[in-house]
């Protein structure tokens, strides 16, 4: 999930009504989020409600969340005013699906949380992730996938070729999806902080999703990113890190409002 705001025990964000994210959450109401603050990063996961004025009866699943939605929208506007200004600068280029009338509010109730400092050291754990750390046994497999074999726009390919690029790894846990900070080394793999991963206990080998983006501009037409979805396997383990080999089956990339998904043979 993209950036949002914390209020009344929920993590709030918005998305297009027609987006794949909204469709998935209507059928599988669980999401994972990462919230970066001045002291570190909070990783969260829990049930998530899609609040849509076109379908008001769905709000009955979380009456308190529905009641707080107006205040949550005000907080989102206040905290992300620069992003809104970026939209006004390019209002004529915005697709209709991105208009305010075609957006929905997402209200996530974090049941499990990890708090990390800026070096990704674990500070605190709550909920299901407050457990005895699991152990990962490295596989003998080695990472052989090379993103350079895939035809990508140059503006997006540059993200995958940065050595040590900051990224996010979506994983599967016993309750649903989770998210971990990581960095990507092309031709080597995904490097994770070992202790937070051991508390989250993702299913590895298993399905993973690696996301890298460049979103420093406030203008939506200047944001770009790439998402690699596929199979992940732990191949190396140190005292502080895990290395996960990624074999993608699909790559989604975006450059402003333009996006595409290509299969990986």
Image (cartoon, grey):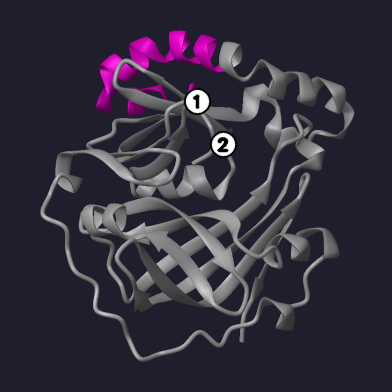
Instruction: Classify mark 1: helix, strand or loop.
Output: loop
Q: Measured from the top left, where is residue 213 in percent x and y?
A: 65, 50
How far apart, in angstroms, are the residues tagged by discs 1 and 2?
A: 10 Å
Quadrant of the rendered image containing residue 237: bottom left
Q: Measured from the top left, where is residue 250 in percent x and y?
A: 58, 72
Left or right, 107 with reference to 89: left
Q: Which mark is drawn over residue 141? A: none
Q: What is the number of callouts on the image?
A: 2
Given this view, does label 1 or label 2 mark the residue nearer the observer?
2
Residue under the image location 50 percent in, 84 percent down: 143
Quadrant of the snapshot with the C terminus:
bottom right
Q: Is residue 71 shown in magenta?
A: yes
Q: Is residue 61 shown in magenta?
A: yes
**Of pointers 1 and 2, the one earlier in the residue sequence:** 2
Q: Which residue is mark 2?
A: 17
Quadrant of the rendered image containing residue 66: top left
Left or right, 148 with reference to 57: right
Characterize the magenta stretch by its predominant secondary structure.
Answer: helix
Left or right, 263 with reference to 131: right
Q: Which mark is drawn over residue 54? A: 1
Residue density around tag 1, few if under 14, some if 14–19, many if 20 or more, within 10 Å: few
Query: Residues in magenta?
Result: 53-76
Judging depth in this view, the residue of 93 and 134 nearest the camera is 134
Work out whether 1 lies above or below 107.
below
Assess whether mark 2 and mark 1 are in contact (beta carbons under 8 angstroms).
Answer: yes
């Amino acid at each position: 999930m993209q950036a949002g705001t914390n209020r009344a025990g929920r993590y709030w964000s918005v998305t297009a009504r027609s987006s794949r994210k909204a469709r998935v959450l209507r059928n599988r109401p669980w999401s994972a989020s990462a919230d970066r603050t001045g002291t570190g990063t909070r990783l969260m996961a829990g049930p998530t409600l899609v609040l849509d004025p076109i379908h008001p009866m769905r709000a009955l699943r979380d009456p308190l969340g529905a009641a707080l939605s107006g205040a949550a929208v005000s907080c989102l506007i206040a905290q992300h005013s620069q992003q809104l200004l970026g939209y006004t600068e390019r209002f004529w280029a915005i697709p209709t699906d991105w208009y305010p009338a075609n957006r929905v509010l997402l209200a996530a109730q974090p049941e499990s949380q990890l708090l990390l400092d800026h070096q990704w050291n674990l500070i605190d754990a709550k909920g299901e992730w407050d457990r005895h750390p699991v152990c990962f046994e490295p596989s003998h497999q080695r990472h052989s996938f090379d993103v350079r074999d895939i035809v990508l726009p140059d503006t997006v390919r540059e993200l995958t070729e940065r050595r040590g690029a900051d990224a996010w790894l979506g994983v599967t846990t016993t309750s649903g999806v989770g998210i971990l900070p990581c960095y990507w080394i092309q031709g080597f793999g995904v490097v994770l902080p070992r202790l937070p991963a051991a508390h989250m206990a993702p299913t590895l080998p298993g399905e993973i999703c690696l996301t890298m983006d460049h979103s420093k501009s406030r203008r939506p037409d200047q944001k770009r990113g790439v998402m690699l979805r596929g199979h992940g396997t732990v191949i190396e383990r140190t005292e502080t890190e895990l290395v996960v080999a990624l074999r993608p089956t699909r790559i989604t990339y975006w450059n402003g409002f333009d996006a595409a998904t290509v299969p990986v043979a």
